[in-house]
């Protein structure tokens, strides 16, 4: 019996790749994802995801590149988000701080001596001349300017409202004695000394001129020279009646370093006709603390004239 010849195997076409076998080609988007991750994080994330999808279908190489691009890209996106949030917060804080310092920065001018008095001017609200509504009775709806101080009737005694009483940030350390009392901040870094009462006999009192008398009072209060006060003191004001009232009393303010070297802000008002004066002296360990304390104390304090 003869053997039948075996049929020849048909020639199979050559295929460069079969499913399940790795392809030597590297996916182009995987490379692009890795490269762009160092410059464009969003592009790295997008191209990385597309590359992984293509690699799953084609079994091309480059999966490691795509994963690296994705990881670095996501890290870049997260870092950018955090930086953006912090930048916005910093801008908001800086804007708020700038608005505060515009109103309350009292340490910008150079000091002529160790006391270092110096400040920027603080504009007071437009003041209307003070005039009693009826003879002998103060009109609490009118500002008490320096000029209006001479219209106050005899017998009026100006008082400082104790706005720090019960304040959770301050504690009374020296009870009121001879018109003077002292508060200390709870962190022991600031002190606020209030004073009210008759002007000292040796003070230079100029009849009918509360501004000149107040400058003399401020010089004595801060142990400064008259020239220091003339060069560095600024107009300021304190609320009249209640801390949140719109009516004000003109004052003068001097900032610098006290005799112990601590930054301080002193605010004073003398009434020449009444022979009375009121003052607030705030001293802290640092200038920034003194500015913050000054803002807080003046916000909580008012002058009572009755």
Image (tube, grey):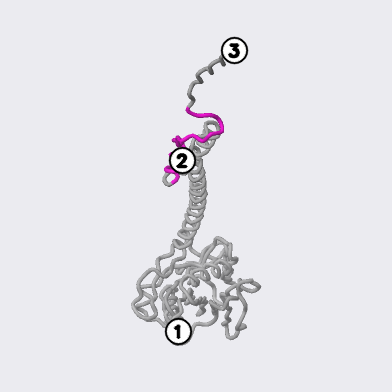
The residue segment tinted magenta is 16-37
Residue reaching furthest right?
Answer: 166
Residue under the point 59% across and 12% down: 2
Label 3 sits on residue:
2
Asked if the magenta segment contains residue 107, the reply would be no
Mark 2–mark 3 Cα distance, whole angstroms, equals 66 Å
Residue nearest the viewer, comparing 25 with 209: 25
Mark 2–mark 1 Cα distance, whole angstroms, equals 64 Å
Residue under the point 51% across and 70% down: 294
The mark closer to the camera, 2 or 1, is: 2
Q: Quadrant of the C terminus?
A: bottom right
Q: Which x, y percent locates residue 121?
A: 40, 65
Which labelled disc corresponds to residue 260? 1
Asked if the magenta segment contains residue 36, the reply would be yes
Which labelled disc corresponds to residue 33? 2
Of the residues under marks 2 and 1, which one precedes in the sequence?
A: 2
Of the residues under marks 3 and 1, which one precedes in the sequence?
A: 3
């Amino acid at each position: 019996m003869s053997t039948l010849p075996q049929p020849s195997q048909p020639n199979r076409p050559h295929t460069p790749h079969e499913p399940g076998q790795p392809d030597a080609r590297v996916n182009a988007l995987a490379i692009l994802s890795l490269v762009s991750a160092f410059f464009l994080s969003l592009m790295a994330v997008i191209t990385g995801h597309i590359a992984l999808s293509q690699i799953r279908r084609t079994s091309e190489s480059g999966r490691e590149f795509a994963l690296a691009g994705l990881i670095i890209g996501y890290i870049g996106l997260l870092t950018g988000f955090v930086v953006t949030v912090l930048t916005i917060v910093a801008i908001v804080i800086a804007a708020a701080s700038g608005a505060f310092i515009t109103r309350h920065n009292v340490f910008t001018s150079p000091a002529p001596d160790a006391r270092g008095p110096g400040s920027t001017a603080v504009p007071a609200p437009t003041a209307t001349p003070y005039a009693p509504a009826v003879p002998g009775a103060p009109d609490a709806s009118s500002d008490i300017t320096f000029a209006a101080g001479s219209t106050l009737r005899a017998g009026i005694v100006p008082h400082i409202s104790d706005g720090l009483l019960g304040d959770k940030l301050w504690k009374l350390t020296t009870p009121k004695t001879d018109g003077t009392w002292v508060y200390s901040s709870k962190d022991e870094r600031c002190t606020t000394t209030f004073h009210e009462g008759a002007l000292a006999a040796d003070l230079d009192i100029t009849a009918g001129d509360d501004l000149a008398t107040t400058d003399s009072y401020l010089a004595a209060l801060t142990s400064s020279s008259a020239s220091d006060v003339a060069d560095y003191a600024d107009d300021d004001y304190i609320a009249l009646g209640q801390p949140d009232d719109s009516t004000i009393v003109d004052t003068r303010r001097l900032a610098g370093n006290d005799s112990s070297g601590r930054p301080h802000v002193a605010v004073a008002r003398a009434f020449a006709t009444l022979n009375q004066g009121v003052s607030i002296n705030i001293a802290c360990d640092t200038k920034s603390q003194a500015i913050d304390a000054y803002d807080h104390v003046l916000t909580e304090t008012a002058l009572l004239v009755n």
